[in-house]
Image (cartoon, rainbow, N blue to C red):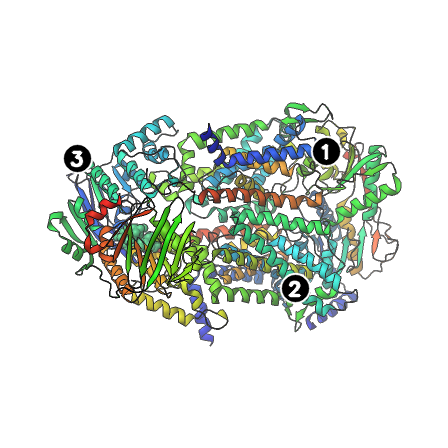
Amino acid sequence: MAQNVLKAVDIKKSFTGVQALKGVTLEIRPGEIHCLAGENGSGKSTLIKVISGVYTPEGGHVEYDGKSYKKITPIEAILNGVQVIYQDFSIFPNLSVMENLAFNTELASKSKLVNKKRMRKIAEEAIDKIKFEVDLDAKVGELPVASKQLVAICRALMFNAKLIIMDEPTTALTRKEINALFKIILDLKAQGIAILFVSHKLDEVFEISERFTILRSGELVFKGNTKDLDDKKFSYYMTGREIQIEPFEPKLTKQTKMLEVKNLTLNGYFYDVSFSVSKGEILGISGILGSGRTELALSLFGIRVVDSGIIKINGKEVAINSPTVAMENGIGYVPEDRLTEGLFLQQSIGDNIIISEIDNLTGKFGILDERKQSEEIQKWVKELSIATPNPDNACNTLSGGNQQRVVLAKWLARDLKVLILNGPSVGVDIGSKYDIHHILKKLADSGLAIIIISDDIPEVMSLSSKILIMRDGKISNTFEPSETTIHEITAQMV
Amino acid sequence: MSIRLKKLLRHNEFYIFVVILLLSFLIQSRSGQFYTPNNIVDIIAALIVPGLFAIGAFMVIVSGGIDISFPALASLSIYTTTRILVDIDYQGGILLPLVLTIIFGAVLGAVNGFLISRFKLQPLIVTLGVASMFRGFMQGVLKSVQIAVIPKGMSEFGTSSLFVAKNMETGLTSRMPTAIIILIITLVVVYFILNHTMYGRGLYAIGGNEISAERAGFNVKRIKFFLYVMVGIISSLAGLIRVSMMTQCHPTNMLGMEMMIIAGVVLGGVAITGGAGTLKGCMLGTILIIIVQNSLILMGIPTFWQGFFLGMLIIVGTGVSALQVKRLNSPKKGKGGDKYA
Amino acid sequence: MLSKITNRISTVIKNDIYITRLIALMLIWLVFMGFFRFEKFYTVINFQTMAAQFPEFGLMAFGIMLCMILGGIDLSVVGVANFAAIVGAITLKKIVGVDGEMLGIAIPIVFIVGIIIGAMAGAVNGFLISIINIPPILATLGTFELFTGIAIVLTKGKAISGIPFGFSEAITGRLFGLIPIQLLIFLAMALVITFLVTKTTYGKKLYLTGTNITAAKFSGVKTTKIIIKTYMISGISASLGGLIMLANYNSARAGYGTVYTLQCVLIVVLGGINPSGGKGKISGVILAIFVLQMLASGLNKIPEISSFYIPLIWGGVLVAVMVMNYFTENKKIKL
Amino acid sequence: GAEEETKTETKTEAKTETVDESEWEIVIVPKDATNPWFVRMNEGVEEYKKVSGLNIYQKGTPEIDATLQSQLIADLIASGVDAICVVPVDPASLEPVLKQAREAGIIVIAHEGASLENIDYDIEAFSNDAYGAFIMDNLAAAMGEEGVYTTMVGHVTNASHNEWADGGVAHQKANYPNMTLLEAEPRVESEDNGDVAYQTAKELLKKYSELKGIMGTSSYDSPGVARAIEELGLTGKVATAGTGLPAANAEILKSGAVNALTLWDPALAGQAMAAMAVKMLRGEEITDNCDLNVEGYRNLTFKPGSDKVFEGQGWIVINKENVDSFGF
Ligand SMILES: Nc1ncnc2c1ncn2[C@@H]1O[C@H](COP(=O)(O)OP(=O)(O)OP(=O)(O)O)[C@@H](O)[C@H]1O
Ligand SMILES: Nc1ncnc2c1ncn2[C@@H]1O[C@H](COP(=O)(O)OP(=O)(O)OP(=O)(O)O)[C@@H](O)[C@H]1O
Ligand SMILES: [Mg+2]
Ligand SMILES: [Mg+2]
């Protein structure tokens, strides 16, 4: 009977007005690597939360090792050998690595007192499993993102898990780290541990998964082996449409330089960076975490102020020392973390779109012009096909891909010269990703200068007209996409 | 050695300690009366009640909440206790009053705990409403008035002392109240709970990230519930000590202390957003506030200027630590930022 | 026209559960008073009296409301009000002779002086919060002590009295013998704030900054400016409250109205403003002000009930409303 | 407007031909209601109500606050009471509202409000100055009429406390040449809180070793100061005097920490105000030397130079001998 580690049968779950899961069934066999795929908002995270006891489903049941539950608590799920690595890692930023690692074990063993020695031993064993080197007494909040994620992974691994669920585990990792992670996953598989994997990065998904479950709008659309799928079929199941990816070829050739930087330096982060972007061009900047790419973007947008160097916009030198100045000079910035930096989740979609151009939407005496506002909102909702019944709804009712479009709309609503995107499709499904790429290309062709920062090499390759690689705060290489390969770039990054 | 020093310099506690030292030198030079045995004892004695309140406020703030109901809670609890004991003409020792205040404190704390944990309400709103209710209940339903003569057991406890410190020069004496033992015991117990039990680590975990704590398997509801029960008990003990030491029960004279206490805790480097801070810092911050409140006259600051100075202290004190935090968070030059080890 | 209004009202009721509850609460109380104290409560003079009483603390509540929408709080309003009243009183005494000449000029000058004081005090708060980064609760607690301290130093703690009665008469008078002037000042400020919040870019930025200050910065909102502006408006509103107090009591003193701080926080929270920022409407706060006033004035007409029950009722209502919200919100999620 | 005028008219009519005294509503407004002082006043008022059979009651604000008191009175005016007897928190702040009351035809009697203008009469157990002088006499006696002293008030913003203290200081200057006021800290605050009084006194005595006496005003002052004196081992060397109710202070009086406390019985003061209001409502003429038929207020005389402020003989000195004889 217990041939599945986990079987979720006919799960139904709805939120205000949305039926997130319309009777989905998921089966995981011992020791398999299973991929859960689907577009943004198709119900993946919801399904995971049901399995791990965070949500109570309205219909269906979950079987662990043949035991059936209508309702389960997180701790019961853990005791049944289920471990989840959430997208936000679920760590305690204020506590030490050691405590972060040891809490789950300690709690499950119901110990009441803190035994530092034992906790240290647990933690040491945990990081040893993936040869992760970290100071156990460091505060997790002060670690870089990738280390945070590795802490979360170690924590899940050390547990006597039968099933480890990873919701987009590779988003914040570089290729090298991903390789290390995959090795670990295969290792775990060898020990008979099943892995359920959610990711929007196609190459990874195919590389590692054995079986697939694909959801669309809360319904099961495919269940089967990886070998029965190819890129095309996969995209089709996910999106319900055919997707064709073409490389970007700038239509406006050799135009005036829109943005030009010379010898830009922010001590401790990047040094002597020089490059330029022309009208109609898309410049890709890639590099591993910590290579200084994010700080470079923040400096161009005025959040950080450079120590030395020159920034020229349209040939004119400007001192960018605040976002306002950057915006006045026609620069827009789509941040890395859209949830904390890009969006006002509890406010309406409309307000999120117009905030950056709000000062222009006024009539006489600086009074807000409601008509102008709603016209503007309608325009962008339509232009970027943001999927919402009503732009007055709060922004957190949208799925990740649509949220990203809102952030884009916020900037496009301004009359921009340069748009900088940091991770334009982090956590965005292939359908939306395709749409966003399409939008960006169109924008470039209409005269915008675009900089994308991404470690998604295929994305950079297909979008950019020029690629810069950053390493240790310096520009280490420049490529033309047509004259290089993914492999070459990856090799240059580390 | 130098690493140690660097570590020290990163701690807020260190700065407050330095501030306290400097302030004490200032007071000493202006009055010659800071470093005298009796003054030190006086300050410690004055610390007992605010110190207990601060411990409670600190625990709540660490968990990411805030409690502004503790003075009202303590008042209601101790008023009820005293009233009952006076009405039954209780003649015994401190034990029964102690037990009664602990029970009332726990029950009243449970009101906060229940509302906050069961309904996931914001602590600020709940404790604001509950404080108002406690006060209204005490004054309206119980028709509280000052109780001038409290049971002997209580007043004897309140006025008893461990030892008497004498200033040889002036001949002034000060008693070290026995009640200091309660503060010390509470400190030890709370220190143990916070640092050596899973419950205590759970408080920090919740303060750091409540959702993560839930996912990790902490029983967040239960932890929060018992937190407020505990704070209720600690605050009630403070109330008992206050009334016993004053040998009379004035129902409303603790009200309004909450903001100064919270200011002291935050001054001690405890993050008002939760998850960070130490008991040591909390006590140092409280000591600083107590010293200032109780030394304005020693410093020779006229009464009319005292409000002004207190305001300046809060602003400058919290301002310095706020700037300190800002400096720590801003990019450190020469260090490799986001580098992955 | 009428149907339009009723339509509007019914959508408000549907949309805003807080406001619905407050209206229900008010109606219950009005019915209760109707049954038990009809002849004392339902008189023109009673409503006039109430309308003259709430403006002073209502104005302070407005300030706290704006700061709370921004995710902060302003505990210094009472200090600012008294400070403004004291400086206003000193100015008044300087300008106006004993027999009341120059009153016509003095009143506007006093208002200008008061407003400047309020704006400056607010700017100090805004500076401490946005630039020094002190948590608002502590920054404004500190400035409350500070402003009160300065007021005490200025007056040696004494009341400034012997103020020419003309000022008080002008402000406590009634328009057409019917509408208290205090109420008009309150309504004017309510209109200004409603306008700022709903019709201007400032209002949008206020709510968005309150929701997520990082995202606001990344969207090019000058958050420092918004914070300082908001605390300045709060200060101005409080200073108007202080000037009304000056008129109502025809004297000014550093210790007046100390109970208002907590009362205003209660009002604002009950009015549906979320202390973590980004949410709430001015209409809710105005309703909460009305409810509190009717409760207090009503209870003052029932000698059998001690006024000590006011905090009990008030706290109870606050907690009850929060618990009710929990249930309605949860029902919505379960659908 | 018109409303009010008609109201005033009907009221005066009613007054002249009144028979139904049970329709009268007389309200006593104290400073607050937790302070034992006003609890005691309430006892007096309740007793008067029982004896007279009239609708007389005391109604206080939930907290001691000048603004709340003014608003309470405004509410009483709006509900059309017949007489308001008030012990002002801050006399100056009540002028406008009391003016309204009188314009509405309501009788206004005050106590501890000699400076008020918009009242019918003010009844003082004795004047604020005299009361301060009286406390000073007690302090001087305890200090042997010599040495440095200072004054303590609830808040520097409290009107009557500061007047008493001023009265005391003036009295000392005129009568006790060997006593001096502490220049550096002539007035300190107890925040109406026994614990603060205690801490403040301790500090004073540490800083100023020459200090020999502290004059208290709020009823929390002297007891708190006494605790400090006792604890610092200064009993017999430093003295305090002030206001306080007998029962609350029996122990410190007996222990010798406080030599004498002064007060008048608030219950009687409450009754005197009520009696005055009734007298006026009945239309009786109020003259100098009038008799309210309340102990200590049987021969009220106008304060020199005033035709509104009456002074009685209601004060009491309590000391260790008589403290148990009061019954409150
Ligand atoms: N707590 C919630 N309240 C209301 N609606 C929700 C909630 N969580 C999810 N939803 C909705 O349920 C649907 C499914 O969401 P879910 O999180 O499962 O999608 P997903 O497949 O994980 O998407 P993504 O790829 O963006 O992570 C979406 O329409 C989403 O808006
Ligand atoms: N409380 C909520 N109310 C409404 N919608 C919600 C709520 N919580 C989550 N959602 C929505 O459900 C969707 C998925 O939720 P989840 O938290 O899994 O997002 P996510 O996995 O981070 O999305 P992505 O994969 O795109 O990054 C999102 O669109 C989110 O906005
Ligand atoms: Mg998801
Ligand atoms: Mg996701």
Q: Residue at x 34, y 46 (%)?
A: A473
Q: Which residue matches tag 1?
A: D207
Residue D57 image offset from top left, x and y in percent = 70, 53
- Chain of the residue on which disc 2 is drawn: C
Left or right, residue D55 beside residue A487: right
Q: Which residue matches tag 2?
A: C111
- Chain of the residue on which disc 1 is drawn: D
Q: Secondary structure at mark 2?
A: helix
Say which amino acid is labelled 1.
Lys
Q: Are marks 1 and 2 in contact (CB under 8 Å)?
A: no
Q: Which residue matches tag 3?
A: A190
Q: Are marks 3 and 1 in contact (CB under 8 Å)?
A: no
Q: Nearer the viewer, residue A266 or B14?
A: A266
Q: Secondary structure at mark 3?
A: helix
Residue D174 image offset from top left, x and y in percent = 88, 43
Residue D181 image offset from top left, x and y in percent = 81, 39
Q: Is residue D73 above or below residue A80?
A: below
Q: Are marks 3 and 2 in contact (CB under 8 Å)?
A: no
Residue D151 image offset from top left, x and y in percent = 77, 41
**Residues tagged by mark 3 and mark 2 found on one chain of the structure:** no
